């Protein structure tokens, strides 16, 4: 998350841009952008499947033109931006880079974060575009691209809170979040990256717990386990690689726990997390375990226990655990986006778009980094839906139940 950032985004890029300018005028030094569901699923706003969701839970972005509007007049060389998007993170990052170039801001001056944590989506919310294997390949390409082109960018923020929202226990949140992080590091190392170049750019986010004791135990246990894994499995040498960078949300008010209670709870949570991580390793790693439905079934069992405890009065639900109701928007947002897409398709050069998408397809079929032809396609006026459909044609599409 960018320093001093405020997460915002709904409706069209016009509304988003106005809000960002208000925040910057008020002293905000970082922006955190939320995107709507069609964008996060790789669909254009005028696609039938997007009906009723355009601009509802975040800002609608269909093309580079929308990104230009969203960040128009925003000094990208002085503002750090965090983008809450997972499966299509590469596309949004490239559009951000293109807007920066149009502003005269070199890519090596851009700072920010893309959440880009797609594995947790197979466990909880389900905003997935591709099967797990190709999704990891895309993340590896993002790592390599940013190392070469946008070196100050944080390439992934690994989130535990969606699994907790689905019912995961503290030990499960740690185990499944760190297992995903390990899978990302393994993917990057297998692609030829040095662990000490990648690891310091990783960040984590865990949920605010009901009590300070529980929350402190989660963070201590996670740091302890992550440091050991980075040292023992990956041979990391940089102290920054061993440190788990985690954003800590505000927790519910609670008296400060006694030191002995913190240590005891930390030991218990860490032991439970390690046991689950060992089971994931026995299944072949995070992706194989996802495909077997291991994490999902564990979370479902924990959710049932949580419900039973809540119903019986043994557990009090904290404010932060109440489901979020997205902002409601009307059909006018969809009409505006459909009109913008129609104008885009009318003025762009279709031959250039087709040629660039053809190069993207060729890269996806082989081993070349897909972000370079992807950037060309977006610059030519290809939409998010067209780019994702091209990749779906090569990699296949994820369907709910594929990982169960």
Image (cartoon, rainbow, N blue to C red):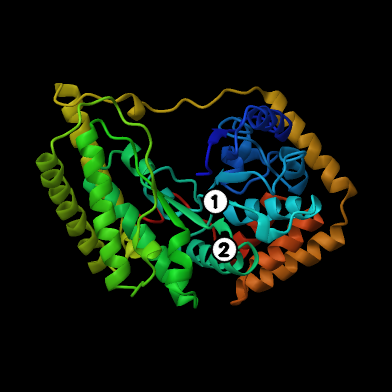
- Mark 2 crowd level (few <14, some 14–19, many ≥20, 10 Å Cα): many
Q: Name the residue located 71 percent from the left edge and 61 percent from the top edge.
A: 375
Which mark sits nearer the N-terminus, 1 or 2? Answer: 1
58 and 248: which is toward the camera: 248
- Left-right relation of 349 to 67: right
271 and 74: which is toward the camera: 74
Count of residue discs: 2
- Left-right relation of 300 to 390: left
Q: Judge whether 347 appears above or below 255 on screen.
A: below
Q: Name the residue located 61 percent from the left edge and 49 percent from the top edge.
A: 42
Residue 398 in sight from this viewpoint: no
Q: Position of residue 339 (x, y in %)?
A: 80, 35
Residue 131's tag is none
Q: Position of residue 352 (x, y in %)?
A: 84, 62
Q: CA distance from mark 1 to mark 2?
A: 10 Å
Helix, strand or loop at label 1? It is strand
Q: Name the residue located 16 percent from the left edge and 52 percent from the top edge.
A: 272
Q: Quadrant of residue 70?
A: top right
């Amino acid at each position: 998350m960018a320093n001093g950032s405020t997460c915002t985004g709904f409706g069209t890029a016009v509304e988003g841009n106005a809000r960002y300018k208000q925040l910057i005028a008020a002293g905000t030094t970082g922006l955190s952008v939320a995107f709507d569901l069609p964008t996060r699923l790789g669909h254009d706003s005028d696609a039938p499947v997007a009906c009723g969701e355009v601009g509802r839970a975040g800002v609608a972005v269909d093309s580079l033109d929308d990104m230009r509007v969203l960040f128009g007049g925003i000094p990208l060389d002085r503002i750090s931006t965090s983008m809450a998007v997972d499966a299509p993170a590469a596309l949004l990052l490239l559009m951000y880079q293109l807007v920066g170039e149009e502003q005269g801001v070199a890519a090596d001056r851009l700072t920010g974060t893309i959440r880009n944590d797609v594995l947790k989506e197979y466990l909880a919310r389900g905003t997935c575009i591709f099967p797990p294997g190709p999704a990891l390949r895309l993340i590896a390409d993002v790592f390599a691209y940013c190392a070469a082109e946008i070196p100050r960018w944080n390439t992934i923020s690994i989130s535990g809170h969606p699994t907790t929202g689905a019912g995961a226990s503290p030990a499960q949140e740690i185990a499944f979040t760190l297992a995903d992080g390990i899978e990302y590091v393994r993917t990057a190392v297998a692609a030829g990256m040095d662990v000490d170049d990648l690891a310091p750019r990783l960040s984590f986010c865990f949920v605010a717990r009901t009590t300070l004791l529980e929350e402190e135990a989660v963070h201590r246990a996670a740091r302890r386990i992550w440091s050991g894994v980075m040292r023992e499995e990956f041979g990391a040498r940089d102290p920054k690689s061993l440190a788990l960078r985690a954003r800590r949300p505000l927790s519910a008010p609670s008296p400060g726990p006694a030191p002995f209670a913190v240590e005891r709870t930390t030991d218990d949570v860490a032991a439970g997390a390690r046991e689950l991580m060992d089971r994931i390793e026995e299944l072949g790693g995070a992706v194989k375990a996802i495909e077997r439905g291991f994490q999902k079934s564990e979370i479902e069992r924990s959710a049932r226990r949580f419900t039973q405890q809540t119903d019986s009065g043994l557990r009090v639900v904290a404010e932060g655990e109440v489901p979020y109701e997205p902002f409601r928007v009307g059909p006018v947002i969809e009409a505006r986006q459909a009109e913008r897409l129609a104008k885009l398709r009318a003025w762009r050069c279709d031959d250039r778009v087709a040629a660039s998408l053809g190069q993207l397809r060729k890269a996806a079929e082989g081993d070349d980094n897909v972000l370079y032809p992807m950037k060309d396609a977006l610059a030519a006026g290809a939409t998010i839906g067209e780019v994702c459909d091209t990749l779906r044609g090569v990699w296949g599409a994820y369907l709910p139940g594929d990982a169960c």
